[in-house]
């Protein structure tokens, strides 16, 4: 008899929370994101609450309108390396781009994190999406969407080959003979793809998980195909149960079509929980958060997504029909989600801006602990999710509210002994590779 499914939970952290205005809240310290104490506090809270992993986002540029919102971002792998020393069970997933980094650097960095954390590392693979990022690496523009995924395929193939260049039992130090490893079990890679080349082998031995967990976010056709081939977990943007169920079925089907066991690819919709002791209090909390939003900044961000100039748009009218037949090629899936929300819920442009500010199109769950737990349970049991990427609006207060008010009500079928360390693959129920 197979063990019961376990609802997996990752705590997503970018800056001071998922809400654009989180840094302006009275309880926030706007300078906290560059303090190690801030990250340690969050990691310890999340580990004590039995989150499966921390999930750190990243952008490789100071973003447009950076003077109006929190845009500075430290290197996730540096932060996670520090957190590996003060945690023992929680997974450590960091974002890194295939567009601007060489596979040898990527493979070495995440293999090192996997070693020092005793098998808790994960790589969130992104192709990057912002022309400001491109310019920081000597490019005038981002490559087209499909070309970025073609490069990602090449880079990940090379990284996997580098991780596999050491056999699991290659290191058997023989002090008497003066031999550190078996040379027959460490091989060159000689990867020569259309975008990258590397000779190998990696100069880091095979890591505890075999290779780190691979996460990916992207719901375009190219993104789904990439996820089906490579991803262990897929971070998806779905705002309704029906859309999430369709995505879930599609990803599992694609995985099977390329010869994978569908149970070895886990789907994690993002959820933005606004939780309070009563539903009315939660709605008031969201109203307060939205009241701190810098509207002009979020309007410009939406315009970037849509490839439209919305400067003179009527905020109290519906989203205007698209004028640009080619929206931002860097964010195809996000454009579809946002436009879908606006049309389905008949939102004014101002209301859509608040949805964008709160969670960039992810499932917005507003209510008391039972309301939110029931929604999550419905998605989990209804074939829409294997777990959730939890994106609380303001850190650390809203994370603690979720821990206190929602997590005790979730039926997670916890199969682990309290305090026992596992690799991240073991926590997710995935095989070692």
Image (spheres, helix red, strand yellow):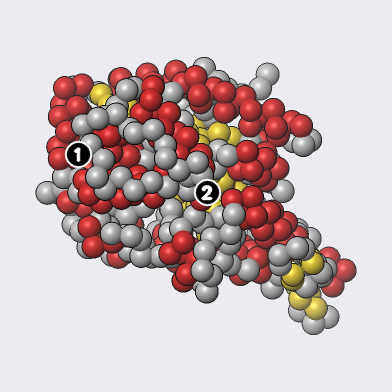
Please report the residue visible at 43 percent of the width from the left and 64 percent of the height from the top.
132
Residue 56 to residue 101: above or below: above
Please report the residue visible at 36 percent of the width from the left and 65 percent of the height from the top.
62
| Contact between labelled residues 2 and 1, with CB atoms less than 8 Å apart | no
**Image location (x, y in percent) of residue 404:** 27, 33
Q: Secondary structure at mark 2?
A: helix
Residue 228 located left or right of residue 82: right
**Image quarter for residue 313?**
top left
Residue 11 to residue 57: above or below: above
**Foreground pick, 396 / 18:** 18
On residue 329, which mark appears? 2
**Image location (x, y in percent) of residue 19:** 28, 44
**Image quarter for residue 87?**
bottom left
**Foreground pick, 47 / 215:** 215
Q: Secondary structure at mark 1?
A: helix
Which residue is the extreme one toward the left? 26
**Image location (x, y in percent) of residue 81:** 46, 64
């Amino acid at each position: 008899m197979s063990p019961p499914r376990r609802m997996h939970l990752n705590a997503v952290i970018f800056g001071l929370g998922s809400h654009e205005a989180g840094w302006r809240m009275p309880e926030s310290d706007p300078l906290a994101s560059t303090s190690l104490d801030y990250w340690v506090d969050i990691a310890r809270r999340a580990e004590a609450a039995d989150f499966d992993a921390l999930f750190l986002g990243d952008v490789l540029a100071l973003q447009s309108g950076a003077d109006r919102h929190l845009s500075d971002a430290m290197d996730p792998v540096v932060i996670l390396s520090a957190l590996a020393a003060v945690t023992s069970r929680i997974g450590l997933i960091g974002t890194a781009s295939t567009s601007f980094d060489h596979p040898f650097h990527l493979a070495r960095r995440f293999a090192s994190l996997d070693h020092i954390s005793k098998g808790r590392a994960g790589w969130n693979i992104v192709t990057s999406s912002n022309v400001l990022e491109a310019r920081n690496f000597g490019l005038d523009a981002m490559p087209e969407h499909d070309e970025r995924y073609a490069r990602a395929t090449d880079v990940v193939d090379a990284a996997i080959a580098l991780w596999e260049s050491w056999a699991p039992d290659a290191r058997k130090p023989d002090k008497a003979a003066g031999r550190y490893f078996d040379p027959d079990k460490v091989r060159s890679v000689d990867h020569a793809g259309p975008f990258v080349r590397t000779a190998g082998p990696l100069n880091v031995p095979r890591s505890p998980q075999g290779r780190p967990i691979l996460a990916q976010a992207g719901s375009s056709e190219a993104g789904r195909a990439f996820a089906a081939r490579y991803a262990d977990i897929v971070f998806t943007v779905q705002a309704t149960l029906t859309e999430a169920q369709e995505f879930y079925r599609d990803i599992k089907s694609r995985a099977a079509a390329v010869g994978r066991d569908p149970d070895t690819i886990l789907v994690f919709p993002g959820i933005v929980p606004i939780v309070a002791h009563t539903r009315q209090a939660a709605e008031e909390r969201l109203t307060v958060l939205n009241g701190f939003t810098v509207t002009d900044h979020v309007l410009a961000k939406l315009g970037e997504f849509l490839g439209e100039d919305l400067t003179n748009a009527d905020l109290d009218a519906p989203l205007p029909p698209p004028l640009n037949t080619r929206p931002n090629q860097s964010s195809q899936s996000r454009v579809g989600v946002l436009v879908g929300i606006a049309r389905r819920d008949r939102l004014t442009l101002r209301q859509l801006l608040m949805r964008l500010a709160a969670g960039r199109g992810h499932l917005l769950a507003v209510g008391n602990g039972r309301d939110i737990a029931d929604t999550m349970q419905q998605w989990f049991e209804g074939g829409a999710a294997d777990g959730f990427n939890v994106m609380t609006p303001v850190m650390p207060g809203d994370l603690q509210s979720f821990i206190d008010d929602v997590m005790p009500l979730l039926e997670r079928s916890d199969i682990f002994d309290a305090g026992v360390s596992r690799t991240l693959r073991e926590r997710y129920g995935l095989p070692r590779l």
